[in-house]
Image: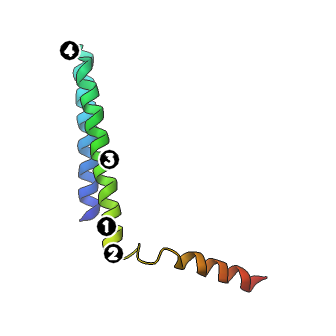
């Protein structure tokens, strides 16, 4: 479900930018391309924030130091 939402948001940004680019080429409206670029960046930012929230809700950010300590312990055991 989460991947579908992220994919839809990405697709909307890409299609909006492509449609505006076609409009700029055919109608010579350069200011519309800036709006589409901003919309694409907005969709990407919302998707990124969605991923951050998802990882937090899944508990991946509770103990961010634990993987580092595991790697250091494994490295010290091999020496």
The quadrant where residue 79 appears? bottom right
| Quarter of the picture holding the N terminus | bottom left
Disc number placed over residue 54 in the picture, else none: 1
CB within 8 Å, label 2 to label 3: no
Q: Of the two numbered discs 2 and 4 on the same chain, state the one appearing first in sequence.
A: 4
Q: Of the two numbered discs 4 and 3 on the same chain, state the one appearing first in sequence.
A: 4
Residue located 28% across and 35% down the image? 38
**Separation of marks 2 and 3 at Cα, in angstroms:** 21 Å
Q: Of the two numbered discs 4 and 1 on the same chain, state the one appearing first in sequence.
A: 4
* Residue receiving disc 4: 27
* Residue receiving disc 2: 58
Label 3: element kind: helix
**Separation of marks 1 and 3 at Cα, in angstroms:** 15 Å
Viewer-nearest residue: 21 or 52 = 52
Residue located 30% across and 53% down the image? 47
CB within 8 Å, label 1 to label 2: yes
Which residue sits furthest bottom?
77
Report crowding for label 4: few under 14, some 14 to 19, many 20 or more residues within 10 A (C-alpha): few
Q: Determine whether, in the image, residue 27 is placed left or right of residue 62.
A: left
């Amino acid at each position: 479900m989460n991947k579908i939402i992220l994919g839809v948001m990405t697709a909307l940004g890409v299609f909006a930018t492509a449609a505006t680019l076609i409009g700029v080429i055919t109608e010579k409206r350069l200011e519309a391309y800036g709006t589409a670029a901003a919309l694409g960046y907005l969709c990407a930012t919302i998707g990124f924030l969605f991923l951050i929230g998802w990882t937090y809700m899944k508990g991946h950010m509770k103990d961010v130091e634990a993987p580092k300590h595991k790697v250091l312990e494994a490295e010290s055991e091999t020496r």
